[in-house]
Amino acid sequence: MKAKMIVWAMAFAALGLVMTQNREFYMSKQALNLDLHYTRINLSELPVSVLFLLVFIFGMSISSLSFISTG
């Protein structure tokens, strides 16, 4: 249990290091345009870090749904 917590702490520390060293990139604004066959989604300009967070949450929700459906 202790080793798992150490690995998670190291992973978050590495993520924090990457985020702080590339602060200009993650704080730059980017618009997201998604053109599907039936609809078009336009998000206003958001920082890249917010877009990464949205994609991460979307991916985690899809993976949890697939985990629930197999159990």
Image (tube, grey):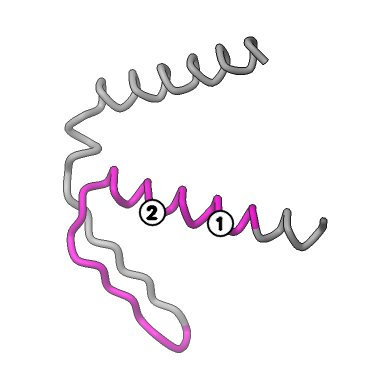
Residue extending farthest bottom: 38
Q: Which residue is mark 2?
A: 54
Q: List x then y, in percent, for residue 58.
A: 49, 57
Crowding at dot 1, Cα within 10 Å, few <14 / some 14-19 / many 20+, comes out as: few
Crowding at dot 2, Cα within 10 Å, few <14 / some 14-19 / many 20+, comes out as: few
Q: Alpha-carbon distance for marks 2 and 1?
A: 11 Å
Q: Give the residue drawn at x 30%, y 27%.
A: 19
Nearest the viewer among 16 and 9 is 9
Q: List x then y, in percent, for residue 49.
A: 29, 43
Q: Give the residue drawn at x 48%, y 17%.
A: 9
Q: Amino acid at mark 2?
A: Leu
Q: Which mark is residue 34?
A: none
Answer above or below: position of 48 versus 61.
above
Q: Give the residue drawn at x 25%, y 27%.
A: 22
Q: Give the residue drawn at x 33%, y 76%.
A: 41
Answer above or below: position of 41 versus 51.
below
Range drawn in magenta: 37-64
From the image, give the main secondary structure of the stretch colored magenta: helix
Residue extending farthest right: 71
Q: Which mark is residue 61?
A: 1
N-term-proximal mark, 2 vs 1: 2
Q: List x then y, in percent, for residue 35.
A: 39, 76
In terms of secondary structure, where does tag 2 sit?
Answer: helix
In the image, residue 41 lies in the stretch drawn in magenta: yes
Q: Nearer the viewer, mark 2 or mark 1?
A: 1
Q: Amino acid at mark 1?
A: Ser
Q: Toward which corner of the image does residue 68 lie, by quadrant?
A: bottom right
Q: Tell whether 6 sits left or right of 14.
A: right
Q: Tell whether 3 sits left or right of 58.
A: right
Of the 4 image quadrants, the one containing the N terminus is: top right
In terms of secondary structure, where does tag 1 sit?
Answer: helix
Answer above or below: position of 25 versus 17.
below
